Image: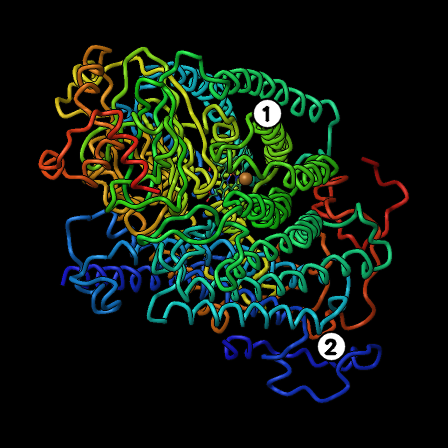
Amino acid sequence: MQTFFIIAILVLGFLITFQIAKASEYVAVIRGEEKSRKQTNKINAFLLLLFLIVGLIGVWYCNDRLAGKILKIGEASSDHGILVDRMLKYTLIATGVVFVITQGLLFWYSFKYQESDKRKAYYFPHDNKLELIWTVVPAIVLTVLVGFGIVYWYRITGPAPKEAMIVEITGSQFKWEYRYPGADKELGKKYYKKINPEEQNPLGQIWEDEFNHDDVYTSGQDEPLHLVVNRPVKLIINAKDVIHDVGLAHFRLKMDAVPGTPTTMWFTPTKTTEQMKKETGNPDFVYEISCDQMCGAGHTSMRGTIVVETQEAYDQWFASKKSQYAMMLEAKNPPAADSAGAKPAAPAADTVKGLAQLK
Amino acid sequence: MSDALHIQPEVGTSHGAHHDEHHVHHHKETFITKYIFSQDHKTIGKQFLITGIIWAIIGGLFSVLFRLQLGFPDQTFPILETFFGKWAEGGRIKPEFYYALVTMHGTVLVFFVLTAGLSGTFANLLIPLQVGARDMASPLMNMLSYWFFFMASVVMIASMFIQTGPAAGGWTVYPPLSALGEASIGSKAGMDMWIIAMALFVVSQLLAGLNYVSTILNMRTKGMSMTRLPLTVWALFFTAVLGILSFPVLLSGLILLLFDRNLGTSFYLSDIYIGGQALPNEGGSAILFQHLFWFLGHPEVYIILLPAMGMVSEVLSVNSRKPIFGYMAMLGSMFAICILAFLVWAHHMFVTGLNPFLGSVFVLLTLLIAVPSAIKVFNWLTTLWRGNIRFTPAALFGIGFVSLFISGGLTGIFLGNSTIDIHLHDTMFVVAHFHIVMGVASFFGMFAGVYHWFPKMYGRYMNNTLGYIHFWVTMIGAYLIFWPIHYQGLAGMPRRYLDKSVWVNFSQFHELDKMITVVSIIVFAVQLMFVFNFFYSIFKGRKVTTQNPWGATTLEWTTPINPGHGNWTGEIPEVHRWAYDYGKDGREFIPQTEPVGANESKH
Ligand code: HEM
Ligand SMILES: [Cu+2]
Ligand SMILES: [Cu+2]
């Protein structure tokens, strides 16, 4: 109903406009085309100037309304994010100045040099000096921006510090999964053909690889990704099916998750989730992982969350976790069956047995 | 459509003359050869334009539909179900359908409207007229290029009506999403049809491009040296070169994709576990496709922009009654843009895991391309400076183009800097950037061209008042729609998100989204008004009574008001000067055909 109403209004508006437009053409003919053309010219020249003024006010107004809803520039939650914000600020200043000057000139000239019988256009086909100036000046400004940009870029994409904790994040339609190396600080090998969620192997870990034995798996649908404040973290990013992207807006970072080609990204979170709740004044604040690369019908809902916490909180949480390997074994030999079995095995032997069964 | 073309009255004398001295068409022209399988460049140009207009309505309508859902996420629109059935059950657009709409919107507007519709129209119309040729180098190839485009259109349209719907992987169709039917319903038969349509499209572009280039190089009239060409022709020349060199790369990329989809090859596929199964493919690279795609994709954005730049240069110069400032600099910057356009493609791939060193090289080259862009802007500003400007609708769209190009070019400097792009890539900021700088700006160039050359195409004027309304609503609307979208990007909001309600950090823009949707509907309605004005004026517009209504110097205005096939009735005029002698030596303008006077000043 409403739709029809809107369409009816549009059609009506259109008919009226069209009648006026047609009439104005006749009027122009009656009043003398040249005269009415000149008058229209004045109106349009004035409107152009008005557009400049209202437009600049509009830019200010838009900023006023929306600045509170965006990520505060300069308050990123990671060390790298601070660099991104700084670069953003420099660019904003440089382009802002250019924007105001060039738009100002464009509309001001349009207004000032509107057709007038008193003026003759000035024949001015070229001027080497001027052209040189506006080649060199932008080139210099851009070189400065590129300079900062590349220095920061190398810092952000450079090798992660040795003490960085490692976490693996895997995207698939339409969820995130995480894997933490255990005490050995190293992730075990995977092979995609080993993926088998029913047998407790959602990532395709190769159980023969001992580095896998203490790796902890969590699903993004059950719990957030845990990170430690002020401790560098290196994400190893994978995808199982199509390309996804780990988007971390508050850390100002993102990296594609490409099936078959693991990627990495490292940074140091600098604000805990609790701190952010206070800073944003939003008690429900969470860091979100958004999938930023279109990945199919559920792209919009491919959401993960992160908690950034203190080392103690992290350790406490991690201690409560079982390795995926242990879960797999448990699934294979349910504990009940185990205790009913003849000889209680030592844990080490258990491991060996588990492996033997897998082969 | 053919009716629309039908009204163009044949100028009797022109027809006779061209039979005497020219080679083509000794057979009698029938309705079919004249309006459908026509080899006249002007008619082919109109065919491209009208097909482009139809596509623009379809592509624009799609965006209005998904904007409805974006602006009013918790409302239902029963009318949608009426039209789209299962795709919009309960009057709510399904995610699968949203992605299909977004994909078709992008593909249609980028390729079918702003490539075929824009350069197809104006290259065909203007190249022979402005270089002084009776037709294209190969009228037959020219005709074929339109009909390949037509076939591409038919296949693309057909893909929208199949059971599983059209392609839905975005206009960039990245595999594996686009390669695997399991990954998305749009990657089933619709995707094969998308590839076939695009392959036909590439053929059309190559036929067209080779023709444009050879016409410009070989068929210039006497005296028309390359540096006397109007900038429109130069722009169309560079456009054609870009297309010839880059479209084949897209085609090769798409063929590999077709193989991966249907023949079990692994060019782009590796280590994939989908739908509970591990696929056998190993060793492919999903990123390879992106390199191939963007090797076309980036030049493509200039294929879209350059014709607009050329026409705006022409229109601004004519209407400010002044020469274009810095003709050689304009040429040089277009040349630089052309070269650099091939060297910046990976700026779309900064966060794909690209080698950081390589990334930094692409940052450098990308920001370099901003220099020729800046030169062009300053030259346009100086062209207006101390002019005597007539604000025809074309001139207004030209000025609007410059404004939009400034705004969108400046945001390019954010994105070209990889440090910032890590944050803004694939957010709404990118959407704002390219809609302003490419989408709307090129449309403005196209509108400028249509209003300016309509008298040449149909011997009539379009209605001015409607033209002014069209300009002002579109100009204001474009900024109202796309300016605030930058802010959504700065909030980190990813692009191609349908429903933001589950997100804590992206759901704060309800009001804004509503405003944007309402404005888009109004702007779309005004475009329909333009289309109406266009068709109405073909039949009922005010008649052109003088040969050179804008007082322009270029050759197309030396032809009869309604030129026949062959363009000039007598001999093709000889050219004696460049195209921009406006306001020289106290003269309003000096046509290119006028010999240089003995005591004329030099510049
Ligand atoms: C000052 C010059 C420009 C620079 C430095 C620049 C830079 C960029 C960069 C780096 C991106 C990738 C952003 C991302 O995906 O994260 C981008 C996207 C884009 N640019 Fe530009 N740009 C410039 C001008 C233009 C022009 C003139 C056009 C078109 C005529 C254009 C059209 C596009 C389009 C269509 C996309 C988005 C493609 C997509 O992902 O769907 N840009 N630009
Ligand atoms: Cu996604
Ligand atoms: Cu690009």
**For residue A65, above or below residue B226:** above
Identify which amino acid the numbered label 1 is placed on.
Answer: Phe
Residue B285, image x and y in percent?
Answer: 53, 45
- Viewer-side residue, B429 vs B465: B429
**For residue B301, above or below residue A256:** below
Identify which amino acid the numbered label 2 is placed on.
Answer: Ser
Q: Quadrant of residue B457?
A: bottom right
Q: Looking at the image, which residue is at 51% across and 20% down?
A: A153
Residue position for label 2: B14
* Res B533 visible: yes
Quadrant where the C terminus of chain B is found in the figure: top right
- Viewer-side residue, B506 vs B586: B506
Residue position for label 1: B357
Instruction: Please tell me whether mark 1 sits on a helix, a strand or a loop.
Output: helix
Q: Earlier in the sequence, mark 2 or mark 1?
A: 2
- Viewer-side residue, B370 vs B174: B174
Residue B480, image x and y in percent?
Answer: 34, 40
Residue A341, image x and y in percent?
Answer: 12, 37
Measured Cα–Cα span from mark 2 to mark 1:
62 Å
**For residue B523, above or below residue A3:** above
Q: How many marks?
A: 2
